[in-house]
Amino acid sequence: MSAIGSRRQTILRLLAVGGVGAVGGFALRDYAPWTNYDAEADRPRQPFPSDPATRPRMMGLIRSATLAANGHNAQPWRFALSPNSIAIHPDYSRRLPAVDPADRELWITLGCALENLLIAARAMGYAPEVTYPENRDLIHIHLAADTPQRDSLFDAIPSRQSTRSEYDGRLIARNQLDSLQNLSREPGVGVHPIVERSGLATLADYVHESTLRQYADEAFRQELIHWLRFNKKEAVASVDGLYAACTGNPTVPRWLGQWFVAGAKPPDLAEAGVKKLRSSAGAVVITSLAETRADWVRTGQVYERMALRMTFWNIKSAFLNQAVEVESVRGKLQSALGLGAARPLVLVRFGYSNSMLRSLRRPVEQVLMPT
Ligand SMILES: Cc1cc2nc3c(=O)[nH]c(=O)nc-3n(C[C@H](O)[C@H](O)[C@H](O)COP(=O)(O)O)c2cc1C
């Protein structure tokens, strides 16, 4: 291997991240230093208005929804605002056909957004009532006036993040583990924490296998490259996608980042994901007994609630969803973990570490549908 080839491999090993892979390094720590990233990251996370006027509060609800976890930070949502309701619509122009051909994760993502919106609505003086998307291509939330019910999950919305670094190996308390298990209030949705070494070793095998499969797929790599933002300028221009620095990577011009991703070796990436799992206190599999759109939405709600609860406890979490995205691996994982008829839809690791750079969001005005 040439010196540069070997350097590229070393960097890629260092940079590989669970699930979303490696983006390039080198010496350009701060490409486009004149761009103010922090101001963009602050904007969606401003305090929510307690204004008695309806519209600013409703806009605040939509802003809270946009802060939810979402696949590749593609933000595949649009919001329709009416005097007494908000509807969340899928934005299929932002779907991820390679990684999510059935739009399952798209609807899980909309469930994450819904959960933030519901928590914020209760905190801001509404009694929300949800109609799930059984027959219609949207989630409808009717909002009646009510007494505000503030809770700790509301305060956690702006600081929840997917923290993709290695964790410090510390375990979480037994009572926290128990309360995660009892978190699901959604019919058919189950939360399965795994902390024993044997269970985690099984998960590691499937994370490894699925990462190899995904990176062997050219369509997967191309889709990832499309959503990667290799430097601050790109990230701030699009206010979406996966910004390299949010995964702890240095930033580079696009041509160099593409070169790194194209040259990434699947075994290195798979090993990096496994290492991150090993550094974690444990993992959680979220399952559903059925797989309609409404079930996917409810699964997203449970994930988001769990992530907010962990944020409140200062526990970090990150998805390793490759193991449920690759269909053949998902089936093996389901039987190896003894989940019976419950289908695994989300795999998340958790533990302790420092926070990372915050991801960006499009402003509410950009995701609002014309009335
Ligand atoms: C359904 C779903 C699947 C995801 N899968 C992965 C994954 O496999 N690997 C990963 O690193 N992040 C994954 N994410 C996290 C998103 O990339 C992340 O939420 C997004 O980039 C926004 O960043 P934030 O969570 O820090 O706000 C997933 C999120 C959702 C909702």
Image (tube, rainbow, N blue to C red):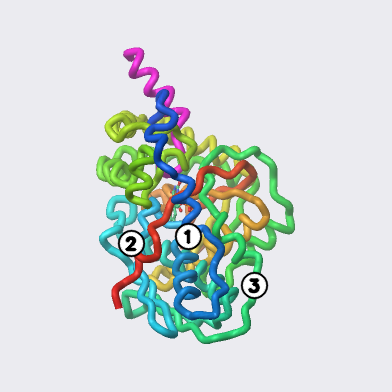
The quarter in which the N terminus is drawn is top left
**Left of 312 or right of it: where is 321?**
left
Closer to us: 304 or 153: 153
Rendering coords of residue 52 (x, y %): 55, 80
Crowdedness near tag 1: few (<14), some (14–19) or many (≥20) residues, C-alpha within 10 Å: many
Location of the C terminus (image quadrant): bottom left
**Image position of 8 with respect to 23: above or below:** above
Q: Which residue is mark 1?
A: 67
* Mark sitting earlier along the chain (2/3): 2
Question: For residue 203, which numbered disc appears in the image?
Answer: none
Query: What secondary structure is found at the residue carrying circle 1?
Result: loop
In the foreground, 192 or 55? 55
Q: Is residue 356 left or right of residue 178?
A: left
CA distance for labels 2 and 1: 20 Å
Circle nearer the viewer, 2 or 1? 1
Q: Where's residue 256, x and y in %?
A: 31, 29
Quickly name the residue at label 2: 103
Q: Amino acid at mark 1?
A: Leu
- Magenta region: 1-20
* Secondary structure character of the magenta stretch overall: helix
Q: Is residue 344 visible?
A: no
Question: In terms of sequence position, does the residue under pointer 3 or pointer 1 come before the other?
Answer: 1
Disc 3/disc 1 C-alpha distance (Å): 18 Å
Residue 17 falls within the magenta-colored stretch:
yes
- Badge 2 crowding class, 10 Å Cα cut-off, few under 14, some 14 to 19, many 20 or more, is some
**Please, what secondary structure does the residue beneath circle 2 have?**
loop
Contact, mark 2 vs mark 1 (Cβ under 8 Å): no
Closer to the chain start, of discs 2 and 1, is 1
Q: In front: mark 2 or mark 3?
A: 3
Q: Amino acid at mark 3?
A: Arg
Look at the numbered disc 1 and say if its residue's Cβ is closer than 8 Å to ligand 1: yes
Pointer 3: what residue? 150
